[in-house]
């Protein structure tokens, strides 16, 4: 004989008294056994996800199946993989900045030492070409 798990107890409470809200389920469970509401919430929402329970618009819970089955292993929902190349191409295409216009700048003449006034004459003449 195996122990009755918390998930099975929650399922039995909902099956035996349909139409309970989440708060009512937590109240009933906390009176019966040592119970953490955060763990109970997680179990309730896992049972909703695997379609053991259903919830109506008013937040009342009902069972979909007649007897409890062990919960399947939790598998997180996977997001679609994004292709890195496609994402980068889209990013570069959307945010492509225009290049600034090319300015033709004449390079500064090299300093010259010696000669007339220490090369000052050559430097001055380079500006007036």
Image (cartoon, rainbow, N blue to C red):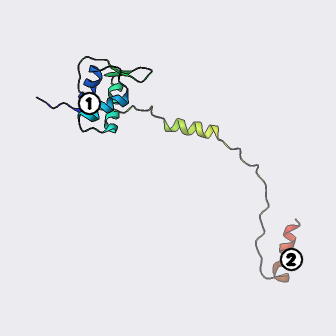
Residue located 77% across and 77% down the image: 112
Quadrant of the frame with the C terminus: bottom right
For label 1, the SS is helix
Looking at the picture, does residue 128 appear above or below residue 68? below
1 or 2: tag closer to the N-terminus: 1
Q: Which residue is mark 2?
A: 121
Q: Observer-nearest residue: 40 or 123?
A: 40
Q: Is residue 51 visible?
A: no
Q: Is residue 24 above or below residue 119?
A: above
**How packed is label 2: few (under 14 Cα within 10 Å), some, or many (20 or more)?**
few
Residue 31: percent from left, percent from top: 26, 34
Instruction: Give the number of callouts.
Output: 2
Q: Local crowd at mark 1 within 10 Å, few (<14), some, or many (≥20)?
A: many
Q: CA distance from mark 1 to mark 2?
A: 96 Å
Task: Find residue 110 and report its horizontal and vertical position in percent.
Answer: 76, 71
- The answer to whether residue 33 is visible is yes
Question: Label 1 belongs to which residue?
Answer: 7
Q: Are marks 1 and 2 in contact (CB under 8 Å)?
A: no
Instruction: Name, please, the residue furthest toward the left.
Output: 1
Q: Secondary structure at mark 2?
A: helix
């Amino acid at each position: 004989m195996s122990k009755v798990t918390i998930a099975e107890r929650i399922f039995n409470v909902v099956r035996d008294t349909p139409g309970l809200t989440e708060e009512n389920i937590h109240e009933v469970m906390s009176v019966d056994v040592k119970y953490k509401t955060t763990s109970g919430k997680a179990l309730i929402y896992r049972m909703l996800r695997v379609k053991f329970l259903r919830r109506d618009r008013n937040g009342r819970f009902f069972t979909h199946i007649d007897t409890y089955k062990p919960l399947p292993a939790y598998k997180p929902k996977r997001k679609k993989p994004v292709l890195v190349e496609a994402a980068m191409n889209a990013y570069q295409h959307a945010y492509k900045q225009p290049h600034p216009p090319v300015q033709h700048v004449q390079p500064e003449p090299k300093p010259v030492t010696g000669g007339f006034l220490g090369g000052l004459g050559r430097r001055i003449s380079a500006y007036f070409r």
